[in-house]
Image: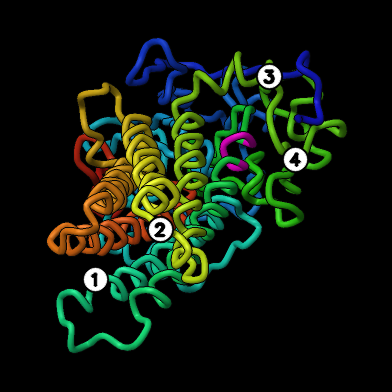
Amino acid sequence: MSSSGNQHFHGSHHYEGEAHGPFSFLNPTERRAPLPTRKADHQSSQGDSVNSGSTNTVEDNLGKQPPQKDEIRAEDVHRKWRSRDNRKGRHTIVVSPAIDADPKYLTPQSTSTLKETLRGLGRMFTTYPYWDVSYLVAIVFTLGSVVWCINAFFVWLPLEDPASEFPGEIADAGGWTAFVGATIFEFGSVLLMIEAINENRADCFGWALEEALEEKGLMRLKPASSCNHHHKNKGNLVGKGKALEGKPSLNSPMESKDQPNSKNARTWTWWPTWHELTTHYFKELGFLACSAQMFGATVFWISGFTAIPGIFNRLTTTAAQNGAYWAPQVIGGSGFIVSGTLFMLETQQKWYLPAWTVLGWHIGVWNLIGGIGFTLCGALGFAATNSGAVYEGSLATFWGSWCFLIGSAVQWFEALDKHPVDIEEGGGRVSDTQPVA
């Protein structure tokens, strides 16, 4: 149960701007709001520069830097809040470059460029934020997917190339790797639920505004040093960020015990209260997706457990194998299908419009296909006396495992990309946009 009382929980997040989602009967999954449109006054104080309707922070003007070559002169900047990004500690901005109009901001370039993508791939092998639960979720599912790919080779390759089979490959190696893979997936699903129930309930902008050097009030956006998402806290997985300790809250709609910088704020939630579930989480598409994943992984683990050679060998009847081994695969795999579908829908503005440009959507797609493969394997297992069904079922595990691996690798990339920048209406770097008058 939660460590704070129901009276301190505010289920809905407070944001200005339009809010929408794929289903009107669930909480919105995306909100978009503009930054303050006025330029900063040179004589304004830092406190005056923070609008009461916005939670962006303005850094001290000490150490100001001139415009960099790869920065973009922007006419307009919008903050885009997504429920998935909020769970992952990500802060997206949408930038409209100023080509002919008078610019107001300096922003980083798009994070979708080849250069930034390669930089993100490099982070995957050089950055290890083990305190970040979203990073751990991605790493654990990647590891589990690798184990399942190894398992798929053990159970499918001997059927494809009998000469490659070694003694005990399918029964022993295949059985034990299935157990290990299912256990890792179960552990990853627990972390996924912890991530979901410890989402940030405050309005964290995640970017800082500072006045650019010699730019007549042009404001630079850069990642903020203070962020109230738990992902930056190295002390524990889901506690309040150390950067906020002792600092005032900016426009937080929550009461004292739910404010992440409050002395009485809860820093860990094993499970939300029934009040929180009914007023908030049951209406959160992301939480429902995580719940379906948890259900599927838990039931699927039964088939991993019964795949252990010493246990499977004792399932001597068809009914015992169907009930203890194949049925949990079908039920668990169906949970993966539901989960992948809901994760896709969470990123879409409409339930029928794919979100091609959102990483989370592609993660959901690959997990959906992987779930289909695992479900198909279990369904074909009911016809285990047919050699063709056995082959196709093993093959379904093979391609399903690789789909899970692709989705997990993309999620790994996503977990390390905390400040995405989307460019609208073309693009332009400082070097090729109109100079400031």
Q: Name the residue beneath numbered marker 4.
A: 268
Q: Position of residue 252 (x, y in %)?
A: 68, 23
Q: Name the residue beneath numbered marker 3.
A: 274
* Cα distance between the residues tagged 1 and 2: 30 Å
Q: Name the residue beneath numbered marker 1.
A: 156
The amino acid type found where label 3 is placed reads Trp
What colour scheme was applied to this rendering of the protein? rainbow
Label 2 or label 3, whichever lies nearer to me, is: 3
Report the side of 35 relative to 319 (left or right): right
Q: Quadrant of residue 117?
A: bottom left
The amino acid type found where label 2 is placed reads Phe
Q: Quadrant of residue 357?
A: top left
Q: Name the residue beneath numbered marker 2.
A: 413
Pick out the residue farthest to the top.
25
Q: Against 59, is 169 above or below?
A: below
Magenta segment: does it hold 196? Answer: yes
The amino acid type found where label 4 is placed reads Trp
> Magenta segment range?
194-198
Question: Going 66% across and 22% down the picture, which residue do you hit?
Answer: 251
- Disc marking residue 43: none
Q: Against 282, is 126 above or below?
A: below
Magenta segment: does it hold 375? Answer: no
Label 4 or label 2, whichever lies nearer to me, is: 4
* Cα distance between the residues tagged 1 and 4: 43 Å
Label 3 or label 4, whichever lies nearer to me, is: 3
* Cα distance between the residues tagged 4 and 2: 26 Å
